[in-house]
Image (spheres, rainbow, N blue to C red):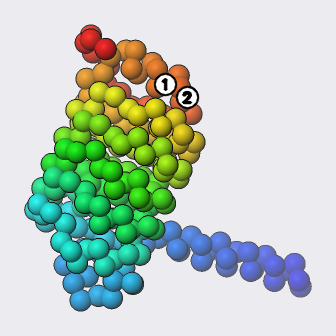
Amino acid sequence: MKLLLAIIFLHWSSVLLAQQDTLKIYRWEEVQKANPDTIFALDASKLKWEKIPEKLYAFKNLKYLNISKNKLKELPLEMGGFKLLKILDATKNNIDAAPIVICQLPKLQKLHLARNRISSLPACIGYLADLKMLDIWDNPINALPEEILNLKKLEVVDMRSIMLGPHFQQKWEESMPQVKWYFDPPCHCVE
């Protein structure tokens, strides 16, 4: 009987843990009158934002934030208040400066910065110990900070649509063989 109860308890516990990872993703329009403490996943994509509204910073419990397909030029330091954030999607904006604020997001696991104008990543990215996926395709990046070598959980880096030479690609593939690197065929450019 005790064994049966233990099995039922373990099964129920695994069901509860699985449910915690399934977050309801709310649209920005839906959360205007919601208690910010009750929102864990937010989709604020395609809103034509040129800057992030102050009201967004009240959602301190966010684990998922999609601000893709806006007109953002930067990720402001106020976003550092999202200490629980695991997934940040800022794809297809106009971000041109290295987004230093990402270094203040200690739980970050997936970072989508594709199709922006970012020319470099901050060295402090090496502090994101939980980072598993870095999507920076179609940005004018020509170097990565050496601190990326500190990211022991990193599994995937997408750098397609970036003109990179064979030495660059080989260096990173050899330095981090556990990472799946996505590159376009190397260019015959000066390195």
| x, y percent for residue 123 | 41, 41
| x, y percent for residue 138 | 24, 36
User: Which residue was labeled with disc 2?
Assistant: 177
Q: Secondary structure at mark 2?
A: loop
Q: Relative to 71, is 17 above or below?
A: below
Q: Which mark is residue 173?
A: 1
| x, y percent for residue 172 | 46, 25
Kind of residue at badge 2? Pro
Tell me if residue 64 can be seen: no
* Residue found 47% across the figure and 37% down from its top: 148
Comparing 35 with 83, the one in front is: 83
Alpha-carbon neighbours of circle 2 within 10 Å: few (<14), some, or many (≥20)? Answer: few
* Residue found 28% across the figure and 44% down from its top: 98
Q: Quadrant of the N terminus?
A: bottom right
Comparing 103 with 65, the one in front is: 103
- Image-quadrant location for residue 137: top left
| x, y percent for residue 154 | 51, 42
Distance Cα–Cα, label 2 vs label 1: 5 Å
Q: Relative to 165, is 94 above or below?
A: below
Q: Secondary structure at mark 1?
A: helix
Residue 129 as seen in the image, left or right of residue 121: right
Mark 2 vs 1: CB contact within 8 A: yes
Residue 188 as seen in the image, left or right of residue 102: left
Comparing 171 with 156, the one in front is: 171
- Image-quadrant location for residue 14: bottom right
